[in-house]
Amino acid sequence: MKSYAREFEIYLKDIKKSSSNTLESYLRDVNQFASYCDENKIEIDELKRRAPGTLHAEVPQGCLIEDG
């Protein structure tokens, strides 16, 4: 899970050119989530299988923002 956090950090810095405050906030959240997953023995493969059917089902239509 930590390697995904590192990849996300690179994406935020190098591609999105996020501000240091944004970067700090996002990474804090991602690292807290990674710790939660580690503590509860949740594997990234399990999240990948579950996310498409659960995350979007809870978001009202029109609320998702596509990054062009």
Image: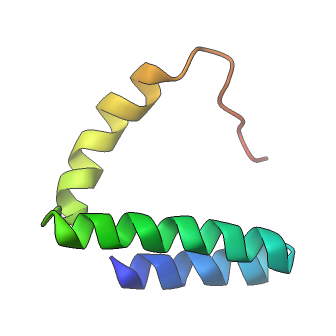
Residue 48, visible in the rendered structure? yes
Seen in the image, is 55 located left or right of residue 25? left
Rendered position, 55 above or below 15: above
Figure label count: 0
Residue at 59% in and 74% down: 27
Image location of residue 7, percent across then percent down: 52, 81
Furthest toward the top, the residue is 61
Rendered position, 39 above or below 54: below
Q: Nearer the viewer, residue 66 or 18?
A: 18
Seen in the image, is 53 located left or right of residue 28? left
Quarter the N terminus occupies: bottom left
Residue 44 location, quadrant:
bottom left
Seen in the image, is 42 located left or right of residue 21? left
Q: How is the image coloured?
A: rainbow
Residue at 35% in and 37% down: 52
Image location of residue 34, percent across then percent down: 36, 70
Residue at 78% in and 68% down: 22
Residue at 20% in and 61% down: 45
Image location of residue 56, percent across then percent down: 45, 28
Residue 16, visible in the rendered structure? no
Image location of residue 32, percent across then percent down: 44, 69
